[in-house]
Amino acid sequence: MHNLLPQDSSSPDKLEPFSRVQLIVADLDGTLLDPTRSVIDLIQSAIPRLRRRGVKFTIATGRAFKGVSAILPRLKLTASTPLALYNGSICIDAAKRQVFYSLKIQANVTKEVVAWGLSRGLPVLCYPELALRSGGLLETPIGFTVDGIPAPHPEPNGYDIKWLSASQVDSAPDCLAVLIDLRDRLTWNLISERFLHPGVTITQSGSSFLEIRPHGCDKGMAITAIAKQLRIPLSGVLAIGDNDNDIEMLEAAGIGVAVGNASLNLQSVASYSTSLPAAQGCLQVIRLVIAARRYRAAFQ
């Protein structure tokens, strides 16, 4: 059963667990970002204060690298910040543009997932492994529709997609992730069952997509890899999220926090929940950790 997040001015015993935090890992959509992005400037100014207190900050998201690259400067994340992408199937060093952890869906399984989505009339997006080209990370996602006509909705990370038809499913590659697009509400009632295959797991961060991950992949495994990369024990990690695809991350971290708008499933595994939703809840957590670390320093 989760507890309500303490206040900055809480008693020392309530602040003590947060004084040991060395790394905060936040989900992005629905957590660090709210629909209006009205709080991000406050978070932006708080992250350097975290660093001065010896606490690192990063994100674990279902997005592709392009989907987060424009946000990193706004958050004032350092160039050496490790990132978990595609719901944890890959972790990259943003400075070196290097992959230090990854899992993939094998091509034969990708084909089955694509065929399953197309048989239900749903667009399917495939995200192949990242390629290192000229010192940068290159992503080349492709899409499938039954007839190869582009889907009505844009790709969520801003990519121009090459669309293929059902007759070209055999060209589906090894993938870091596959998204089945549910944004056409006319097809929502068709999703009465889930694709089951030992090579993948499925999660859902909202009503827009079914998110297909490699077997054994989740954000919990990703933050474990990030903590190891940074030489920080998991007991010193605080993870914060809002939806079911954040469950393993909160379970793996020393402290798991659900924002106020979190799903019931996530709340059930969280150590704490914030009184405010999304980015406002994130700001509560950041300010609390800063206060706890300040208190710890004062009495060392």
Image (cartoon, grey):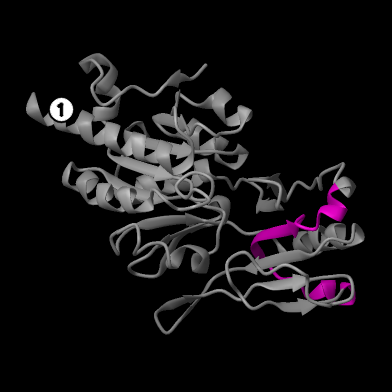
- Up the image or down, 268 lies above or below 168; here it is above
Depth check: give the residue in front, 242 or 202.
242
- Up the image or down, 258 lies above or below 31; here it is above
Locate residue 25, reporting x and y percent. Answer: 40, 44
Query: On the rendered structure, is 191 left or right of 59?
Result: right
Query: Is residue 233 among the parts visible in the rendering?
Result: no
Give the magenta-colored segment's residue range: 166-188
Please say whether residue 177 is one of the residues in the magenta stretch.
yes
| Residue 257 position by quadrant | top left
Q: Residue at x 66, y 64 (%)?
A: 175
- Up the image or down, 246 lies above or below 211; here it is above
Locate residue 199, reporting x and y percent. Answer: 72, 51
Depth check: give the residue in front, 118 or 153.
153
Q: Residue at x 34, y 69 (%)?
A: 96
| Residue 114 position by quadrant | bottom right
Q: Which residue is mark 1?
A: 296
Query: On the rendered structure, is 255 left or right of 298?
Result: right
Depth check: give the residue in front, 221 or 273.
273
Depth check: give the residue in front, 271 or 98.
271
